[in-house]
Structures are given as C-alpha cells and as structure tokens.
Image (spheres, rainbow, N blue to C red):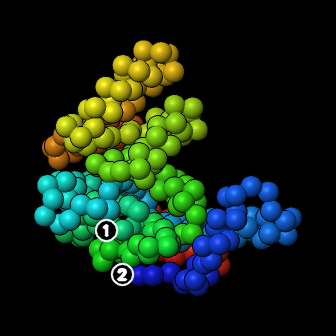
C-alpha cells in the first residue's frame, strides 16, 4: 500500500478546524485556512490525477467482516474491478474496506480518500494508494471528481451526506447524469418512499430528479446496470490511461 508524502502527515489542530467553522475570524487566520485548503486540493489533484476511471463506493465504517452487507460489498468491489474500474472509497474500515478488498481479490485497482478525525480513522490494508485529507468537503470533492458512477451501500449520516451531495450535483447539472445507485432494497426503500411521498408530493423535487436515484439489490443487478448503462454512456472503452509527469509532481499507480 503506497502512502504519498504530504504536509498532511503532520498532526492537525482540532481547535483550528473548529474555529474555521465558527464564523468570522481574523483576516490572517482565514487567509491561512484558505491557503491550506487550496494546498490540500492541489495535493489531492496531483495524487489522484491518474487513478481513473473510478467508481466510488460509499457506506458505513461500522459493519464487520461477518456482516452480510460487508460480503455483498466485497463481491461488488470485485465486479467493478473486473469491468475495468478503479474502486474508490473513503479508505476506512467496514463497507469501505469491503469494496477495496473486493477489488484486490481480483487484482484490480483500489484507492482510498481517508479523513483525519479526532478519533483517528485508519486506512484499510486493501489500498494501492491512499490520500489523507483534513477537510470533509475537499475529500468529497475528490470522491466525486474521478468517478463515473456512485454506489451507496447501507450507511449512516456520512453516507447520507455523500449520497445527497452527489444527487444534488446531478440534479443541478453540475455533473453529467452519473448514476447514483443505492444497493440494498430493504435498507433504502423507506428513504425512497419518503422522497416520493413527501418531497415529490410537495413539489420540492421533480419526478425526473427521483428517477436519477436507482435502487438495486444484487451483485448481478449492479453488474448488468453498469455494463448496459455506464460503459456505453461514457464510452469508457475508449479511455486510455495517461502517464504521470514528474515535472508536475504527479504519481501513477
């Protein structure tokens, strides 16, 4: 597992993070934070420029290896890799580990965008490369930027945040009609019903918006959907992997 060298390996101050989000601060402090965020973005771009095409898998860090959702995600990770995609996750344990592990089971490419937390989340051991971030919004940018589809396995607040951010980007046309796939009908159906019976009913969203969220249940359904929809839509067979240039501090995988 390759770990890129970075200023982010230094210990971050929880106080600085909380002050950043608490409202106006001194001009010098806000300039410092803006520069740090800018550098974190450049750091991510340079380390992830050549990892694609990716599919990002979201999901809870809390499911153990013996959980059915872990096993299902591991199988999906293998299918994604066999289709030629790099499997990208948040880099942590649980569902994220399962997806990365599935990719490595079949010799595929596996990437993690880890987040530094007060209760430190360690990258899982099934990563070819992991990049560590201090800010959630920078991390989410990287998880979106390099992917052609998004698969949400069962998860909590973080997974919901990621799903609805991607759905909003698709709804508003900020990204193309990249599929947002929710896997696990029993888990996701109540949420879908809420969207249909409350948001759609009160015209907070359109019917077309709801159709952009796909619920699937099995590895076979995911595999078939990606083969029939994602690969033809984006002509991914025509994509050639470019070589990194040391001049720009770029790294391959």
Q: What numbered label is drawn on residue 1?
A: 2
Viewer-side residue, 85 vs 36: 36
Q: What numbered label is drawn on residue 93?
A: 1
Quadrant occupied by the C terminus: bottom left
User: Residue at the location (36% across, 21% down)?
Assistant: 196
Q: Position of residue 58 (x, y in %)?
A: 36, 53
Viewer-side residue, 12 vs 84: 12
Q: How many marks?
A: 2
Who comes first in sequence, dot 1 or dot 2? 2
Q: Position of residue 200 (x, y in %)?
A: 43, 19
User: Residue at the location (24% across, 61% down)?
Assistant: 63
Q: Nearer the viewer, mark 1 or mark 2?
A: 1
Compared to residue 225, the image places residue 41 above or below, namely below
Q: What numbered label is drawn on residue 239?
A: none
Q: Is residue 146 visible to the viewer in this orientation of the structure?
A: no
66 to the left or right of 118: left
Q: Residues within 10 Å of mark 2 (few under 14, many from 20)?
A: few
Q: Position of residue 115 (x, y in %)?
A: 48, 68
21 to the left or right of 204: right
- SS for callout 1: loop
Where residue 86 sits, quadrant-wise, is bottom left
Q: Residues within 10 Å of mark 1 (few under 14, many from 20)?
A: many
Where residue 57 sits, quadrant-wise, is bottom left
Compared to residue 211, the image places residue 4 above or below, namely below
241 to the left or right of 96: right
User: Residue at the location (64% across, 67% down)?
Assistant: 17
């Amino acid at each position: 597992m390759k770990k890129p060298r970075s200023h982010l390996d230094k210990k971050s101050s929880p106080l600085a993070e909380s002050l950043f989000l608490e409202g106006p601060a001194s001009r010098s402090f806000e300039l410092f934070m803006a520069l740090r965020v800018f550098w974190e973005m450049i750091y991510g771009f340079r380390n992830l420029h050549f990892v694609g095409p990716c599919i990002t898998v979201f999901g809870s860090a809390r499911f153990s290896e013996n959980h059915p959702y872990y096993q299902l995600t591991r199988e999906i990770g293998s299918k994604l890799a066999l289709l030629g995609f790099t499997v990208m996750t948040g880099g942590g344990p649980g569902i994220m580990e399962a997806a990365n592990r599935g990719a490595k089971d079949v010799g595929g490419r596996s990437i993690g965008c880890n987040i530094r937390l007060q209760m430190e989340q360690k990258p899982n051991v099934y990563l070819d490369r992991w990049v560590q971030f201090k800010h959630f919004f920078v991390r989410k940018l990287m998880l979106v930027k390099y992917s052609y589809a998004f698969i949400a396995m069962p998860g909590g607040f973080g997974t919901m945040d990621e799903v609805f951010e991607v759905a909003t980007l698709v709804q508003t046309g900020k990204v193309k009609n990249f599929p947002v796939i929710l896997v696990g009908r029993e888990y996701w159906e109540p949420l879908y019903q809420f969207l249909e019976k409350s948001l759609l009913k009160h015209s907070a969203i359109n019917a077309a918006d709801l159709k952009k969220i796909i619920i699937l249940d099995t590895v076979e359904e995911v595999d078939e959907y990606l083969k029939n929809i994602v690969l033809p839509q984006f002509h991914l067979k025509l994509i050639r992997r470019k070589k990194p240039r040391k001049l720009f501090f770029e790294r391959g995988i």
